[in-house]
Image: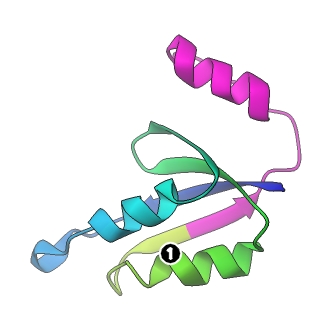
Amino acid sequence: MTTYIVGYDLTRKDGHDYTNLIDALKGFPNWWHCLDSTWIIISNQTSVEIRDALMTHMHKDDRLLVAQHTGSAAWFGFNDNCSDWLRKNL
């Protein structure tokens, strides 16, 4: 399993509904979402496969980044649940 950081900017134009995007992110076996536009997911898929799956739920003017996490991490200001997940999974 590989850890990915997923970030996006959503245009929210024309009443575009992002429910399917959120559901797709929650469909990964292990995920973290403690920042508004950032997720961390753990998956067997490649970054390209993840991007391709998620972008089907996005507007053409939205932006999406899927990057493999390969190093250490540091954080500040998260509650215990968010921090515990990071400690266990990064």
Q: Quadrant of the C terminus?
A: top right
Quick one: SS at disc 1? helix
38 relative position to 18: left or right: right
Q: Quadrant of the N terminus?
A: bottom right
Residue at left 80%, top 51%? 69
82 in relation to 59, above or below:
above
What residue is drawn where x is 79% and y is 66%? 44
Q: What residue type is labelled 1?
A: Leu
**Is 74 placed left or right of 16 in the picture?**
right
> How are the colours assigned in the image?
rainbow
List x then y, in percent, for residue 41: 65, 52
Residue in the image at 46% along x and 38% along y = 35
**Outermost residue to the top:** 80
Q: Where is residue 84 in the image (x, y as percent from the top left)?
A: 66, 19
For the point 53% across and 57% down, which residue is it? Answer: 7
Q: How many labels does the image show?
A: 1
- Residue 8 percent location from the top left of the image: 46, 62
Whether 47 is drawn above or below 89: the answer is below
Q: Most extreme residue toward the left, as rendered?
A: 15
User: Is residue 16 within the magenta segment?
Assistant: no
In the image, 11 versus 40, the foreground residue is 40
Q: What residue is disc 1 on?
A: 54
Residue 9 in the image: x percent, y percent? 40, 63
Going by the picture, which residue comes out furthest to the right? 71
| Above-or-below relation of 31 to 1 | above
Query: In the figure, residue 17 lies in which quadrant?
Result: bottom left
Q: What stretch is highlighted in magenta?
A: 65-90
